[in-house]
Structures are given as structure tokens and as C-alpha cells.
Image: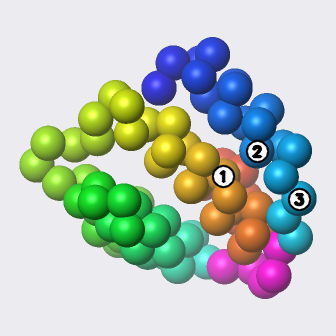
Amino acid sequence: MTEPTRSEVVRTLAAVPVRASRQMTSTEYQFRVSEILRLFDIEAVGSEWGVIYGDKGVELEDQPLIDAIRILVGKRFDIPESLM
């Protein structure tokens, strides 16, 4: 994703009040993100090494959505920013 687009996503999501409910492990985080991505018909599978995408990968127009999902899940479940 381009840096201006990522910056816009981060700036917009900073205005969304989200309170962490509990801390999640990195593996749980990857699985949760992949579950949400599948709701948007993005082929993704969570593993302990990260989120693995389907044969086509991720389309350019889906990248802001994926970034937003990662940030929101990270805020909600108190994930270190290095994993997002």
C-alpha cells in the first residue's frame, strides 16, 4: 500500500474510539484478522506465521480495507503495533 493511503487510514481510524477488551496472542490475532477478511470474500488463512492469502494475493483496491481491519483488531485486542 502506498504511504499516503496508509497514513490516511491510520489518521481516520485514530478518530474511532476503541477500547482494548483483552490481550490476544499474535497467533490469535492472525486467525481473527483472517476470519474478518473472509467476510469480505478475501481468501485468507491465519497461521502462526501470519495471514496467508489465496492464489491471486490481495488486490490493490482491497489493501486499505485490510490495513483498517488489522489496525482495528489490534486496537480492540491490545496487539503490539509491530504485528499490525
Residue 36 in picture, x, y percent from top left: 45, 68
Residue displayed at 60% across by 47% down:
68
Quick one: SS at disc 1?
helix
Q: Which mark is residue 17?
A: 3
Residue 71 in picture, x, y percent from top left: 66, 52
Q: Which residue type carries mark 3? A: Pro
Q: Main secondary structure of the magenta part?
A: loop
Q: Residues within 10 Å of mark 2 (few under 14, many from 20)?
A: some
Closer to the eye: label 3 or 1: 3
Question: Do the CB atoms of the residues marked 3 and 2 lie less than 8 Å apart?
Answer: no
Q: Which residue type carries mark 1? A: Ile
Q: Residues within 10 Å of mark 3 (few under 14, many from 20)?
A: few
Residue 8 in picture, x, y percent from top left: 69, 26
Q: Is residue 68 left or right of residue 38?
A: right
Q: Residues within 10 Å of mark 1 (few under 14, many from 20)?
A: many
Which residue was labeled with disc 1? Answer: 71
Which residue was labeled with disc 2? Answer: 13
Residue displayed at 71% across by 51% down:
81
Counting residues from the start of the chain, the first of labels 2 and 1 encountered is: 2
Does residue 30 appear in this view? no
Question: Do the CB atoms of the residues marked 3 and 1 lie less than 8 Å apart?
Answer: no
When the figure is inspected, residue 2 is found, relative to residue 19, above or below; the finding is: above
Counting residues from the start of the chain, the first of labels 3 and 1 encountered is: 3
In the displayed orientation, state which residue is furthest to the bottom: 22
Quick one: SS at disc 3?
loop
Label 3 and label 2: CA atoms lie apart by: 8 Å
Label 3 and label 1: CA atoms lie apart by: 12 Å
